[in-house]
């Protein structure tokens, strides 16, 4: 048996002899890398073609993940809303709950600056309005200005409204109402309206059951 080194040397000698004897093989040998290049390109073509396929498969996956994130956000918002409702029910049960709201009907004759509310001679709410909040009231918005507990029985509410009246004059008016608190929740609306006959604003209180 021949030694491996010898076999390699013999192969080299045989290759050199073959190249010298057959000069025509040189161009073929030179051309072989060129021929191999397209073959390599052809081999790499499937890998390049796989890239768009991978991107296309990633798009539905991203959409699915985005949908799941949106679902989780919706669940969190719903849970937060339910917790707020539960908290109000625990802190302000219906048999003692009283809610006060402020609304404005037209309100062109009065520019609201602030409101102060007293219940049984005790200040329970005082609020200073921004121009954007006043605009929201003009557009039909309703503000819950106070939520609290009152025992059953008779109570007195006094609301003071401060702002600018006709001819840009400082304006302060009050509205008073006595009401009976029963075992059901009580909702009271403080309304600001325009009196076209008197050409001045009016303030009244409406009781909701």
Image (spheres, rainbow, N blue to C red):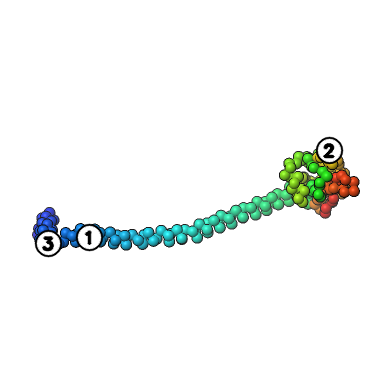
Residue 106 x, y percent position in the rendering: 81, 49
Instruction: Identify the residue under disc 3.
Output: 22
94 or 133, nearer to the observer? 133
Q: SS class of the residue under badge 2?
A: loop
Label 3 and label 1: CA atoms lie apart by 16 Å
146 or 20, nearer to the observer? 20
Residue 185 falls left or right of residue 2: right
Q: Crowdedness of circle 1 by 10 Å Cα count: few (<14), some, many (20+)?
A: few
Instruction: Identify the residue under disc 2.
Output: 169
Label 2 and label 1: CA atoms lie apart by 100 Å
Residue 48 x, y percent position in the rendering: 37, 59
Splitting the image into 4 quarters, where does residue 16 fall? bottom left
Residue 131 x, y percent position in the rendering: 74, 42
Q: Crowdedness of circle 3 by 10 Å Cα count: few (<14), some, many (20+)?
A: few
Q: SS class of the residue under badge 1?
A: helix
Q: Crowdedness of circle 2 by 10 Å Cα count: few (<14), some, many (20+)?
A: few
Residue 2 x, y percent position in the rendering: 9, 58
Instruction: Identify the residue under disc 1.
Output: 32
Splitting the image into 4 quarters, where does residue 25 fall? bottom left
């Amino acid at each position: 048996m021949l030694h491996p080194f010898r076999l390699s040397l013999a192969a080299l000698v045989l290759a050199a002899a073959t190249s010298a004897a057959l000069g025509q093989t040189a161009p073929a040998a030179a051309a072989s890398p060129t021929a191999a290049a397209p073959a390599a390109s052809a081999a790499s073509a499937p890998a390049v073609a796989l890239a768009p396929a991978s991107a296309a498969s990633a798009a539905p996956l991203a959409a699915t993940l985005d949908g799941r994130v949106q679902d989780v956000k919706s669940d969190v918002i719903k849970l937060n809303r339910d917790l707020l409702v539960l908290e109000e029910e625990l802190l302000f049960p219906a048999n003692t709950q009283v809610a006060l709201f402020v609304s404005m009907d037209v309100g062109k004759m009065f520019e609201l600056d602030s409101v102060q509310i007293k219940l049984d001679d005790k200040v329970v709410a005082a609020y200073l309005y921004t121009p954007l909040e006043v605009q929201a009231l003009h557009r039909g918005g309703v503000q819950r200005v106070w939520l609290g507990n009152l025992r059953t029985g008779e109570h007195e509410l006094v609301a003071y409204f401060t702002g600018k009246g006709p001819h840009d004059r400082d304006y302060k008016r009050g509205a008073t109402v006595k009401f009976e608190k029963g075992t059901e929740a009580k909702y009271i609306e403080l309304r600001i309206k325009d009196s076209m006959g008197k050409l001045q604003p009016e303030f009244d209180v409406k009781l909701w059951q």
